[in-house]
Image (cartoon, rainbow, N blue to C red):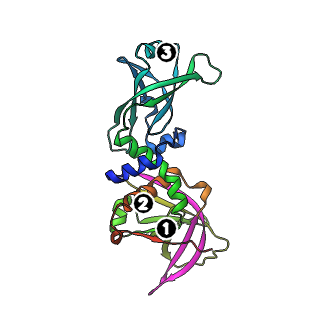
């Protein structure tokens, strides 16, 4: 997970204060939520629950009401806290913290008479860790739309920040070929490989993009949008790849988004994000 400045955390809080993250399977994976480790704490007792959604102001949780939870909340004047648990990378320890809150009520959940969905309002400013995790996730869709035309040139500094492997494999006509990623964006990449006959009007490709910390490899299907020789190297070919938008994984988006969030905290002369449009 990127380390965000106080200003970026403040921006996240102000911009997404009322926005909800609904914890679908995709959101759980992208945020690193440890869904089995979420508990509601009230008067010293812990109740297992399901975190349905959260903003920076409120949370909705699903819990069994046949366990004495409602009565305990009434005794506590509807005050409780939620135990959050995230694992933000494969090499990190679980990140655990509590947020104090007040119950605004509950309603039946589905057709079960035993389970209800509770709405809680936070009664304290959310921890920086929660703002960071939810803010990163909420900013993905915005950056995915607003910064779709920007590419990241892979030089040593950007490779280090992205934790990306410059060496890759691209499948062209189901034949794997070694290549170098020259630049990358939410929607595509420029790759360099040995010369071969290419018809960009018909070629579909799959580019394997690998990251570390945590280790992830994404198979990115797409198609070629341009082909050109590399200046001074007639034996090399530069190909523009446009990813199939509907198949771009959320965790890939998060990787690119983290770099953009981090980069735009820095002075302009240090930026390695270049305006770019994939040419048809």
The image position of residue 26, as x and y in percent, is: 53, 43
Q: Which residue is mark 1?
A: 150
Q: Which residue is mark 3?
A: 70
> Which element carries disc 1, helix, strand or loop?
strand
How many neighbours does mark 1 have within 10 angstroms: few (below 14), some (14-19), or many (20 or more)? many
How many neighbours does mark 3 have within 10 angstroms: few (below 14), some (14-19), or many (20 or more)? some
What is the distance, in whole Å, between disc 3 and disc 2 at their CAs? 44 Å
Q: Residue at x 37, y 58 (%)?
A: 262
Mark toward the start of the polypeptide (3 vs 2): 3
Q: Which residue is mark 2?
A: 260
How many neighbours does mark 2 have within 10 angstroms: few (below 14), some (14-19), or many (20 or more)? many
Q: Which mark is residue 92?
A: none
Q: Nearer the viewer, mark 3 or mark 1?
A: 3
Question: Tags 1 and 2 in contact by the CB under 8 Å rule?
Answer: yes
The image position of residue 48, as x and y in percent, is: 45, 23
Hey, which quadrant is residue 271 in on the image?
bottom left
Q: Is residue 82 magenta?
A: no
Q: Is residue 233 magenta?
A: yes
The image position of residue 148, as x and y in percent, is: 53, 64
């Amino acid at each position: 997970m990127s380390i965000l400045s106080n200003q970026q955390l403040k921006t996240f809080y102000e911009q997404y204060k009322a926005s909800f993250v609904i914890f679908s399977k995709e959101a759980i994976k992208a945020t690193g939520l440890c869904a089995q480790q979420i508990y509601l704490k009230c008067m010293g007792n812990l109740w297992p629950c399901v975190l349905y959604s959260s903003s920076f102001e409120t949370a909705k949780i699903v819990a069994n009401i046949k366990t004495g939870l409602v009565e305990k909340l009434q005794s506590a004047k509807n005050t409780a806290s939620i135990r959050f648990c995230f694992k933000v990378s494969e090499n990190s320890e679980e990140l655990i913290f509590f947020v104090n809150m007040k119950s605004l009520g509950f309603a039946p959940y589905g057709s079960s008479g035993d389970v209800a969905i509770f709405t809680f309002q936070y009664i304290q400013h959310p921890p920086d860790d929660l703002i960071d995790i939810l803010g990163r996730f909420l900013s993905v869709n915005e950056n995915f739309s607003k910064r779709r035309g920007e590419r990241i040139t892979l030089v040593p500094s950007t490779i280090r920040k992205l934790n990306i492997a410059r060496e890759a494999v691209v499948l062209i006509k189901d034949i794997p070929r070694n290549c170098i990623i020259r630049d990358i964006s939410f929607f595509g990449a420029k790759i360099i490989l040995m010369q071969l006959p290419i018809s960009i009007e018909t070629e579909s490709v799959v580019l394997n993009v690998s990251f570390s910390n945590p280790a992830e490899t994404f198979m990115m299907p797409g198609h070629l949008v341009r082909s050109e020789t590399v200046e001074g190297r007639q034996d090399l070919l530069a190909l523009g790849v446009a990813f199939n938008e509907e198949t771009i994984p959320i965790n890939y988006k998060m990787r690119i988004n983290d770099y953009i969030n981090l980069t735009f905290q820095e002075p302009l002369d240090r930026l390695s994000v270049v305006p770019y449009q994939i040419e048809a």
